[in-house]
Amino acid sequence: RKRMSESASVPFRPCSNPDCGTMESETKKHLRCARCKTAVYCTPACQKKAWSSHKKHCVAPGTSAPKPTPPAAPAAPAEGATSEEQVGEAAAPAGDGDVELIEGGDALGGTFIDVAANNYQKALGIFVERDGETFSNRWNGMAVQGRMGVINVTFDAMKNHTIANDTGFRLNEEDYFKLCPEIAPPNRKFLAANPEAFLKLCKMVVKVSRKKCIEYMRKRRAELQDVTVEAGRSLQYHVVIGDEEAEGSLDFFAGVWRLLVAETLVCVFEAMVGRKAAEMEHMHTNPKVAAEAEKPDPVAPEVPVTDDQLD
């Protein structure tokens, strides 16, 4: 993160969290809000705690104050959501970041997350089309407790990996389930008790486009106000849903949702049909790799071949 100037002319300042007030010191400088360039915080936790009040007057230098946002109605519970229309009706906000973030995108690894999300959505589609019948026969033949066991093991493995990430992005458990109610405990019970619902959910997730998912996030604005995603190579950014004029983190949250839900469902298919998504050809390509592959191979200098070498 960028830190405040260590120039002696800059006085030490208190943390802008009204419940904290910790002063800077020579050895510990506060983090500065990337949008307004005025508020400073001693820790990301303080920034997050103060965001609900700070966002009302947090504006970039030279811009007008943010417009007040009318309260949004609470979203309907996602339990049993298995259609694209239900996903479209359950979502929320636009986004904008907090400390060190004005808008998301490439700086936060947004492109990488979108590529990974696309890859896992495609892998899920291949599983459904190629192995759907095999999956259904095995899945429907299991007792509810058996399906619940598979769901819990695979879903929890993905969740635990995400909350323990030390690069890319990370969420705590509460925010993980709030962002992705489709794979949260209440919906797990629904999927286990209704075997056909799992494949319906898979087919819906395959069809959710980036644009559709952004709308889903926007409609869930109020529900996601307190969700924070730590992002970046060193998790140096703390991304939150902001005002409706800032689209950066809205797009970022949509990519994270598509990746987490699609990859989690893929894990269930892998466990049930004995195939791995990593074996699919498209999983080994991304824009950077493809660009490198298109570069011509360096031309090696010609070496004369002698009769001795041919023998």
Image (cartoon, rainbow, N blue to C red):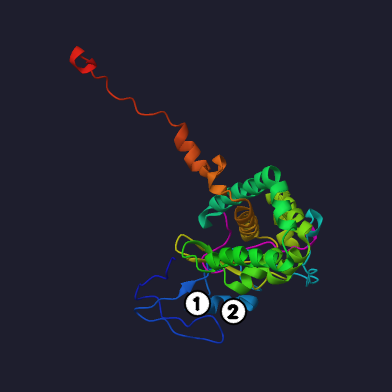
Amino acid type at circle 2 is Ala
Q: Is residue 92 magenta?
A: yes
Q: Is residue 61 magenta?
A: no
Would residue 176 be seen by someone viewing this image from the given angle?
yes
Residue 162, by quadrant, is bottom right
Residue 150, by quadrant, is bottom right
- Crowding at label 1, few (<14), some or many (≥20) Cα neighbours within 10 Å? many
Q: Quadrant of the N terminus?
A: bottom left
Tag of residue 50: 2
Residue appearing at x 69%, y 48% in the figure: 134
Tag of residue 41: 1
Q: Quadrant of the C terminus?
A: top left
The earlier-in-sequence mark between 1 and 2 is 1
Q: Is residue 127 left or right of residue 89?
A: left
Can you give x and y, in whole percent of width and height, for residue 286 in the image? Answer: 52, 43
> What range of the chain is rendered magenta?
87-105
Can you give x and y, in whole percent of width and height, for residue 230 in the image? Answer: 53, 66
Between 201 and 294, the one lying in front of the other is 201
- Crowding at label 2, few (<14), some or many (≥20) Cα neighbours within 10 Å? some
Can you give x and y, in whole percent of width and height, for residue 73 in the image? Answer: 81, 71
Q: Is residue 130 left or right of residue 274?
A: right
Q: Secondary structure at mark 2?
A: helix
Where 229 falls versus 12 (above or below)?
above
Farthest residue, direction left:
308
